[in-house]
Image: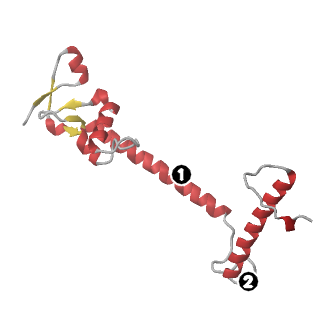
């Protein structure tokens, strides 16, 4: 049907051009719209994503009949397959972590306080008070041992006996 002369990097080196059907090419802009090329913190615009893809796929990038940077459908298919594989690995890792956390979590009936005889509010307040007291005790112990914990204490004259 339509045929176009496409210049590849390899053909450019030898001064040749290969005929390619534009329907067999996928523009880098389309791949950027699909989320490829956005992996860096420095990529803030679609143009940046396209430039990044062009650098990443340098040997496979060709110009189509209207001058857009493109890759073959096989290359695009490979990119999509790689992304799907990476997403599957991430999903499996997340499921393993969740299962591990579920195994380590204490087994208590939902809605029941951790301490029998206390309401959930009383348990929460007791826990909060205990944490604050433990932290204050550690700071004071550090101070008494002469360890600089980064905190300063104000000692009033009436505190000294």
**Label 2 neighbourhood size at 10 Å, few (<14), some (14-19), many (20+)?**
few
State the residue lying farthest toward the right.
Answer: 161
State the mark number for residue 118.
2
The residue indicated by pointer 1 is 93
Circles 2 and 1: CB atoms closer than 8 Å:
no
Q: Is residue 61 left or right of residue 112?
A: left
The residue nearer to you, when weighing 99 against 69, is 69
Q: Position of residue 58 (x, y in %)?
A: 30, 28
Closer to the observer: label 2 or label 1? Answer: 2
Q: What element carries label 2?
A: loop
Q: What element carries label 1?
A: helix
Considering every residue shown, the one lying at the far front of the view is 157
Q: Please name whichever residue, 33 or 59, is drawn nearer the observer in this view of the structure.
A: 33
Q: Earlier in the sequence, mark 2 or mark 1?
A: 1
In terms of image quadrants, where is residue 29?
top left
Indicate the colouring scheme.
Answer: secondary structure
Which quadrant is home to the N terminus?
top left
- Cα separation between marks 2 and 1: 38 Å
**Residue 11 x/y as whole percent:** 21, 20
Residue 157: numbered disc: none
């Amino acid at each position: 049907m339509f045929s176009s002369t496409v210049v590849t990097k390899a053909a450019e080196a030898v001064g040749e051009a290969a005929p390619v059907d534009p329907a067999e090419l996928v523009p880098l802009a389309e791949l950027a719209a699909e989320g490829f090329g956005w992996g860096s913190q420095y990529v803030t615009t679609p143009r940046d994503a396209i430039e990044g893809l062009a650098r990443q796929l340098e040997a496979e990038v060709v110009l189509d009949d209207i001058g857009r940077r493109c890759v073959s459908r096989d290359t695009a298919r490979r990119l999509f397959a790689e992304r799907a594989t990476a997403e599957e690995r991430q999903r499996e890792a997340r499921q393993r972590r969740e299962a591990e956390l579920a195994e380590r979590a204490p087994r208590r009936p939902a809605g029941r306080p951790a301490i029998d005889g206390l309401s959930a509010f009383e348990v929460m307040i007791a826990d909060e008070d205990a944490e604050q007291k433990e932290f204050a005790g550690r700071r004071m112990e550090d101070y008494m041992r002469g360890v600089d914990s980064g905190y300063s204490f104000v000692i009033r004259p009436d505190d000294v006996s």
